[in-house]
Image (cartoon, grey):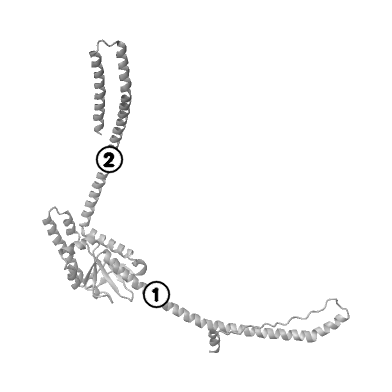
Amino acid sequence: MEAFPLLLTALLALVAGLAVGVLLGSRRAPSASAHDLSLSSAATAQAVEPVRESLDRFGERLRELEASRIEWHAQLREQVDAVRQTNDSLRKETASLATALRRPQVRGRWGEMHLKRTAELAGMLDHCDFELQVSVQGDSVLRPDMVVRLAGGKCVVVDSKVPLDAYLDVTEAETEEDGIAHLRRHVRQVRTHIDQLAAKSYWTQFDQAPEFVVLFVPGESILSAALEAEPALLEYASAKKVVLATPTTLIALLRTVAYAWTQEQLAANAQEIQTIAREMYDRIGTVAGHVDKLGRSLEGTVRSYNDAVSSIESRFLVTARRLNALHVSDTPVESPRLVESTPRSLTAPELVDELTS
């Protein structure tokens, strides 16, 4: 943008130099006539006119570009202000969320919500029965967050834990030393949750429950940070009969349970189909007996009809023809037709066997 004023200045200087040159030339030639001077000025004006028009167009274009630049800068400033306000709002909301999640009650509720959402994503609402906040009376009242009912009457206990206090300090640490210290405290908090959950021995409180309990951590990064700091944490939890699970691994576990329920349902459907088929086969025999009786009745009816027709032809019509010979009526009496079709007998082996059994 700054090159345009420089170019405009150079062109103006060129025009001014040309005019000064013409003026000096006229002073150096006193003998020239006024007519020659007028012609020279006209020629100079004619030569400078295209340059002046170009400079006018250039100046107009320059003003348009300057106006566009000002408008663009104003829009850019508005967008930058909007982004700054959004970042400030997100920063405040994040700080509020972090502050809220430092309270144990809020963390517990947040973990339960993620646990239920994970079960919904795994399709457990349709394929598996799960119960939230089930109370078990043992030496004390135990309240696992979720009990997953397995096919075959077994169950798996899931408890949600949110070791978030030290983890938030890790993310907010200003120095590397502070971050390492908070990370160690985060590992200790995860280990404490493992010990507390293992001490409850849920598998002794529920019938046919496997000897392990699932510790659900609602954030992938929460557990991965602890495992990166102490890889042996998985082995430690396994020795305590505690299975560490995040939403990803819990969805895989619940989908496996859902698949088992699907197979159980298919097996139940197959058994029901077998029962219905047996009942239907037995009823086919009953229906075949009724059809056979109906066929015999029809056969007897046809036989009786044909006997009646024979009697009419051999006895009744003989007398009727004698009356016709005496011109009692001009319309002859037609003989009724015999029924030559007979009911078809059952021939299918299944139906015949049912009738003979």
Please tell me which residue lies in front, 135 or 34: 34
Left or right: residue 289 versus residue 132 is right
Q: Residue 175: name its quadrant.
A: bottom left
Which numbered mark, 1 or 2, is in the foreground of this view? 2
The N terminus sits in image quarter: top left
Q: Which residue is mark 1?
A: 266
CA separation in Å, label 1 and label 2: 63 Å
Q: Residue at x 37, y 72 (%)?
A: 262
Which residue type carries mark 1?
Leu
Q: Give how far across and how far down residue 12 sits, in percent.
A: 26, 24
Q: Is residue 266 above or below residue 104?
A: below
Q: Which residue is mark 2?
A: 76
Which residue type carries mark 2?
Leu
Indicate the secondary structure of the residue bearing disc 1: helix
Task: Tell me if residue 132 can be seen.
Answer: no
Q: In the image as oriented, which residue stretches furthest toward the bottom?
A: 357
Q: Give how far across and how far down residue 41 sits, in percent.
A: 30, 16
Q: Residue at x 23, y 49 (%)?
A: 91
